[in-house]
Amino acid sequence: MPDTNMLDTTRLKFGIGQPVPRAEDPVLLTGQGRYTDDITLPGQVWCVMVRSPYAHGVIRGIGIEAALAMPGVLGVWTGADLVAAGYGPMKCGMPLKNRDGSPLRTTLRHPLATDKVRFVGDPVAFVVAETRAEAKDAAEAVELDIDMLPAVTEASAAAAADGAQLYEEIPGNLVLDFHQGDSAKVEAAFASAAHVTRLSIRNNRIVVCAMEPRSAIGSFEDGRHVLRLGCQGVFGLRAQMANEILKVPTEQVRILTGNVGGSFGMKANAYPEYACLLHAAKQLGRPVKWTDERTGSFMSDQHGRDHEVAAELALDAEGRFLAVRLTSFANMGAYLSTVAPLMGTGNFWKNVQSNYATPLIEVSTRCLLTNTSPVSAYRGAGRPEGNYFMERLIEAAAREMGIDALDLRRRNHIRPDQFPYAAASGSTYDGGDFTALLDRTLEAADVAGFATRKAASAERGLLRGLGIGNFLECTAPPTKEQGGIRFEKDGTVTIITGTLDYGQGHWSAFAQVLHQSIGIPFHQIRLLQGDSDELVAGGGTGGSKSLMASGAAIVEAAELVVEKGRAAAAWALEAAAGDIEFEAHAEVGEGRFLIAGTDRGIGIMELAARLRAAPSLPEGVPATLDVTHVFDQAPQAYPNGCHVAEVEIDPETGIVRVDRYMSVNDFGVIVNPLLVAGQAHGGIAQGVGQALLESVAFGEDGQLQTGSYLDYALPRAGDMPPIGFVSHPVPATTNPLGAKGCGEAGCAGSLPAVMNAVVDALSPLGIRHIDMPATPERVWQAIQSSPGAARTAA
């Protein structure tokens, strides 16, 4: 155990910038974590969902009599039951507008389908029984009478005149016709361009595959709905459940979250199962538990990505960017989830600019409903995609114009003397060092030695390619966030926050911020984040904003603790409040209040204990150092960097292997390098998965063809090379910590780096572009049909 009583050790090991191991790891690694499925409440019973086996059809009837008669069954409910109970629908409330100014058309999704089923897995009923096995048996006995209808699974097909229509009230399946940009100016730029590069790019659909499947327990306790589940923020989920679905005051709903085994955006909002559990719990007077199986997760969890994009870049004769234009179809799935339209619209618009001085941007996206699982945020949520489109355009333009791709990037980088930079996307970049960062990456990746490595690969009959992934992403702007600090009776200090850790390691990072701010001993700091009853605000975790929001809230709350502490220390030291000074780190290893000009003082932890023990206090002396504070807001930040990937391709099999990987990143001030490197590694792995392996497939009838890990490939340890991580920070000016966010940046750099490397390896064969995922089959087919293969055969 580190000695926290020595100043130098404390500063070196637990301050901002130090690689402190995650405080929660000993608990998790010894199997003491408490995930939702680990919980068993007294009297608990089990729920199993009944899902549609068809992608599209009219519900004519649901037979529940046989199921009700089965052993252990306590109840079977259908959509009609929940409508009669007065529950409201889930909907998307984003303030997005069509190009004509009208609001988007949202779907009103009830917890259970009542009129039609619209995707395979659409829940139509649920069974509750004494045991899970009994509930599963009874669910299979529920009889569904559904008249099948034609299905549509691609967004572009849903836009066609003969495409299957999911809703009578949403003609053409179009929920949003988004447009942003000056069409006349963009068209003029393309008309005057010396060169125009065009690519048709598919952003493949992804199954989120969180390690922990969704699970929840509903109960009705003391007149309140209590929901235990894994989520990304209990404060926001409580509001959605209470206001939209249950139609009760928020104080009648409590959300509790323990450990969460991954989410990546998927567990952020309400799902149909949650209302079902709470309804049954209230009716039965017993807790009701549901845990999804992996096949159910593939169908019922929200998917990610899924865009068909026509990307265009206009350049002048010197290779300067004049305009970039994206024209897209975005697949929303069967129902519009909470943030579904954001990725292919506003986040394309904000992020396609990247770190380049592109004067004009135009984004046109048609968001369409299809007979597929709903789509929502997935790590980066449109940010990696925007950067991917730009980087692929740059590589293609460089080849077409005969300009070195690295030089083309340098020519168009925003220069340091241009900050603050008003981007065409509407963002104002506060700082960066883009060209220097690129050059540092090239050195760290030993790009100079690539030719030698390429020759060595060729000797073994392999194609070798090098890919650059230059990126800049716009984080979500931090919203109101709680920064509570509570001094406990046992001598610990609790941070209370509305963000929620689902694998990121918030505990250590937040503790480092508090330790640095007011010298609370690191090992005495605890974190409370998963109880909505403890919160007065909370933006949840998502959009790479947690440290910028919670970190800033903690810094400001710590200042309030010091302010209260001056009055308390004046009492304890028998001095005037104006004579009290505070030192965040004193020789005993904790913050101390001192009488100015003397060595008399009191440690912050001792002061908190004295206040607790005091039978009475004079007027004006606070009874506690506890603080409940809400950080207002801050502008978004702009993490950026450059990734370099090298791949080897076996032309006989089409197998792609990532051989080398280096990343240099500007994440601003880094609180914990160990955690940040881990976040980057995870994002890079998910980017490699999307680039080379992962893709959801549906049949023409809407059946999910990739419904298990037998059909859907995730990257394994053997698919990943050692990942280099170098920090090149330029502190942000948009938040008190100078942090820029890092959780999603790994995807933003890895998608273009890996795919540019694949295309570079294949370019000698005349291959200009290949879509993700670059599976062996797809690569082999591209090689067989390439101009280079034809020449070789001749």
Image (cartoon, rainbow, N blue to C red):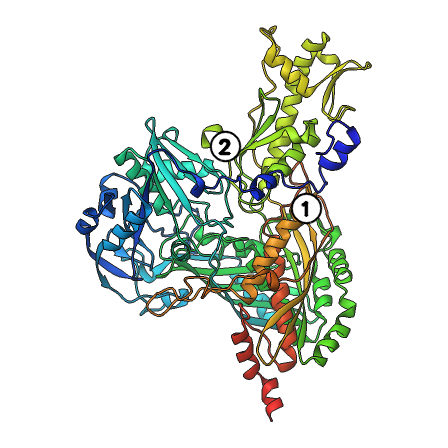
Say whether marks 1 and 2 touch (CB < 8 Å).
Answer: no
In the picture, residue 746 is in which quadrant? bottom right
Q: Position of residue 751 (x, y in %)?
A: 59, 62
User: Which element carries disc 1, helix, strand or loop?
Assistant: helix
Residue 325 in which image quadrant: bottom right
Residue 363 is left or right of residue 620, and the answer is left
Circle 2 packing at 10 Å, graded few (<14), some (14-19), many (20+), is many
What is the three-letter code of the residue carrying label 2?
A: Ala
- What x and y, as percent, mark residue 30? 57, 42
Mark before the other along the chain sequence, 1 or 2? 2
Front in this rendered view, residue 364 or 759: 759
Give the residue number, with chain letter if any, for mark 1: 674
Residue 743 is labelled as none
Choose between 691 and 68: the one closer to the eye.
Answer: 68
Residue found at x 29% / y 42%: 130
Can I make out residue 185 in this image? no
Q: Residues within 10 Å of mark 1 (few under 14, many from 20)?
A: some
Q: Which residue is mark 2?
A: 537
Residue 670 position, x and y percent, is 69, 43
| Amino acid residing under circle 1 | Leu
Q: Is residue 758 above or below residue 28?
A: below
The answer to whether residue 543 is visible is yes
Looking at the rendering, in which quadrant would you find the N terminus?
top right
Residue 500 percent coordinates (x, y): 53, 39
Residue positioned 69% across, 53% down in the render: 665
